[in-house]
Structures are given as structure tokens and as C-alpha cells.
Image (spheres, rainbow, N blue to C red):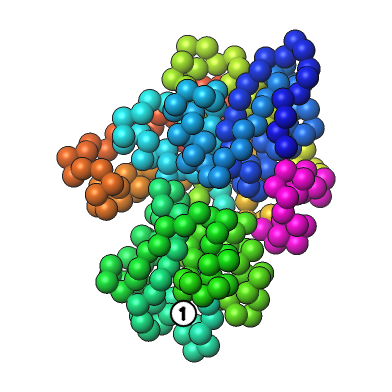
């Protein structure tokens, strides 16, 4: 799907992504030639999850990666050095949620999870795991009241349908797919006040010395942002082509995403909350010092291109 274009005279750049709707602006910029207009031959490398793209980036096999915010927190706490120059969504709405098998009278999350010990699957090491922790904490559900099962996002709808788990906590499109396939046998629990995943670009620290390539990448993405605002139906067709999702799914989740290149205060809030969660859940030692996450946000290129996009 992501073959290297044959154009000559363009700078070859690799970007690792999870091929999901959250990366719509990346797909639009690639498909419409907006990166090429900037002199870049962007090769998109596909990963099962954004956290896997970040791991490959940290290993040196990519120029840039795009992931959710939780992998950024965990990688920073682990001592990895990189910068975040932009988000590829301004915000999302209920993008991570719990989808469960409907059990009639158990029509609230509180009733459902307190009726008996539940099997809940989620994706470990990313936004869904953080949401699950916050969600269950708010309900007062303890470890002995729920069994957390680690699964790949793509496997979760089938696990829920088969009944091997009682509920899943995952992002779109997989939450929507589960809802669609189960129909009235599904019940969804959301809490937007807790968390709704953001998606960010990771770049090497060396861009602080020379951000020429990064600036071109951001310019291409901002052109994609304008195109997507003006031509949402054409943008959807591009996303359908790249993700292989059907139109009903894309239509159903499209408005959950605020497709714009930005840096928002919510990102910093999430990174700090996630760092505390990582300490509380022993993902890192109690002695771990929470860094000033503002230091990893490199806003100079975006501020130069689109000052109003930088809200931090």
C-alpha cells in the first residue's frame, strides 16, 4: 500500500504510522501530493499500533513517527530523547471507550462492572490502558473485581462477539466496529472527562538545530488540514483507501476527530497525568522524577508556520 514513489529530486523521508483514521491528515497529504509540493518523498511505514511506530523510530529506522500520547510519556520516563513538534489532531471525543455485551438491566458502567468479576481486554502500553485505569478507578472497581486481558486492537471486536471477554476498552475504529457488529447486543460506556486520546508526531532532537525537513512536513500537513476542512467527503475517500475501512465506519467516527495540526494545553495535562499513573502502577519506579514535559515540546517550527496553532 505504501510503496516508495519513483519521483526523483525529492528528499526521501520515512514516517511510521498506525493506519487508522486519526492519521487522516497524513494520508491526505500523501495522497494529494502536498508533501511532494514541499520537496519531500514521504514513505509511510505501517505499524499495528502507534507505540510500535515509536519503538521503530527510537531504534533509528524512521525519520518520524506518530503515536498516541501515552507512548510519549512512557518513552520519556524510560530516558529516551526525542521531541514532539505537533499533534495531528487538535482533540478527540470519546475516541477511547468501553464496549460491553449488553446484559439488559445492567445499563450503567457501575452496575455492569459490579455485578460480577468481568474480563476486560485492552491494549497495554497506550491510551486504552490509561483510560481503563482511570475509568475503573472512578467506578471504584478494584483489581480483584476485574481481569484485564492484553489484546491487539484488531482482535478485540471478535473477542467481544465470541464472548471470550465481557468488555473491551479501545479506540476507534475498533470500538465502532464492535458496536456495529454487536448491534443491540452492545452497550457503550464513555467518560470524555477522563481521557480521549491525542496523536502526536515524534522527531529527533537534532531538529532543534535544523528543522528544514520538519517544517516541510508540517507545511504539507497544514495544507492537508485545509483540504480536509473544505473537502471532507473526498478526505474520507482517501482514508477509506488507506485504512480499508468501509464508508459506514468512517462516517460513524469522523466527527470524533478534530483534524488539525496543533499543540494544545490538553497534551501537557495528559503527559503529566500519565506520568503519575506510570508511577502509581509500577510501570516505572517510585523514585522516577516526573520531567517537565514542556521541554520535549518543540514548538518553533509550528509557531513559525501557523502561530495560532500553538496554544501552549
At 38% from the left edge and 25% from the top edge, which residue is drawn? 81
The extreme bottom residue here reads 105
Is residue 81 visible in the rendered image? The answer is yes
Q: Main secondary structure of the magenta part?
A: helix
Does residue 88 show up magenta in the picture? no
Q: Is residue 295 above or below residue 22?
A: above
Residue 59 at x, y = what percent? 44, 26
User: Circle 1 is placed at which residue position?
Assistant: 108
Based on the displayed image, in which of its 4 quarters is residue 43 positioned?
top right
At 52% from the left edge and 41% from the top edge, which residue is drawn? 50
Q: Is residue 75 or residue 110 the one in the foreground? A: 75
Say whether residue 238 is left or right of residue 289: right
At 79% from the left edge and 32% from the top edge, which residue is drawn? 32
Residue 130 at x, y = what percent? 39, 54
Which quadrant is the N terminus positioned in? top right
At 80% from the left edge and 47% from the top edge, which residue is drawn? 237
Is residue 310 visible in the rendered image? The answer is no
The tally of labels here is: 1
Give neighbour class at mark 1: few <14, some 14-19, many 20+ (Cα, 10 Å): few
Say whether residue 291 is left or right of residue 15: left
Does residue 245 show up magenta in the picture? yes
Residue 124 at x, y = what percent? 41, 52
- The residue segment tinted magenta is 233-253
Residue 26 at x, y = what percent? 67, 36
Q: Secondary structure at mark 1?
A: loop
Q: Is residue 59 above or below residue 167?
A: above
Q: Is residue 258 or residue 303 the one in the foreground? A: 258
Amino acid at each position: 500500500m505504501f510503496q516508495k514513489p519513483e519521483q526523483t529530486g525529492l528528499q526521501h523521508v520515512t514516517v511510521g504510522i498506525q493506519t487508522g483514521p486519526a492519521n487522516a491528515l497524513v494520508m491526505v497529504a500523501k495522497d494529494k501530493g502536498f508533501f511532494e509540493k514541499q520537496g519531500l518523498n514521504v514513505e509511510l511505514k505501517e505499524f499495528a499500533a502507534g507505540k510500535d511506530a515509536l519503538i521503530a523510530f527510537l531504534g533509528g529506522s524512521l525519520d518520524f513517527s506518530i503515536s498516541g500520547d501515552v507512548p510519549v510519556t512512557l518513552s520519556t520516563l524510560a530516558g529516551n530523547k526525542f521531541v514532539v513538534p505537533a499533534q495531528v489532531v487538535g482533540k478527540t471525543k470519546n475516541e477511547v471507550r468501553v464496549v460491553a455485551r449488553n446484559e439488559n438491566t445492567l445499563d450503567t458502567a457501575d452496575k455492569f462492572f459490579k455485578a460480577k468479576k468481568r474480563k476486560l481486554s485492552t491494549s497495554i502500553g497506550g491510551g486504552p490502558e490509561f483510560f481503563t485505569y482511570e475509568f475503573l478507578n472512578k467506578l471504584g472497581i478494584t483489581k480483584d473485581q476485574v481481569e484485564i486481558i492484553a489484546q491487539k486492537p484488531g482482535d478485540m471486536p471478535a473477542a467481544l462477539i465470541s464472548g471470550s471477554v465481557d468488555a473491551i476498552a479501545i479506540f476507534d475504529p475498533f470500538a465502532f466496529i464492535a458496536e456495529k457488529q454487536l448491534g443491540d447486543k452492545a452497550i457503550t460506556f464513555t467518560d470524555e472527562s477522563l481521557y480521549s486520546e491525542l496523536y502526536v508526531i515524534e522527531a529527533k532532537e537534532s531538529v532543534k538545530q535544523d528543522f528544514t525537513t520538519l517544517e516541510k512536513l508540517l507545511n504539507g500537513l497544514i495544507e492537508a488540514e485545509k483540504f480536509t476542512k473544505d473537502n471532507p467527503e473526498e478526505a474520507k475517500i482517501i482514508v477509506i483507501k488507506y485504512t480499508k475501512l468501509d464508508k459506514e465506519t468512517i462516517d460513524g467516527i469522523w466527527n470524533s476527530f478534530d483534524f488539525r495540526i496543533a499543540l494544545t494545553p490538553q497534551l501537557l495535562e495528559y503527559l503529566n497525568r500519565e506520568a503519575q499513573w506510570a508511577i502509581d502502577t509500577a510501570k516505572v519506579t517510585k523514585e522516577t522524577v516526573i520531567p517537565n514535559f514542556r521541554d520535549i515540546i518543540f514548538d518553533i517550527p509550528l509557531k513559525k508556520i501557523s502561530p495560532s496553532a500553538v496554544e501552549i
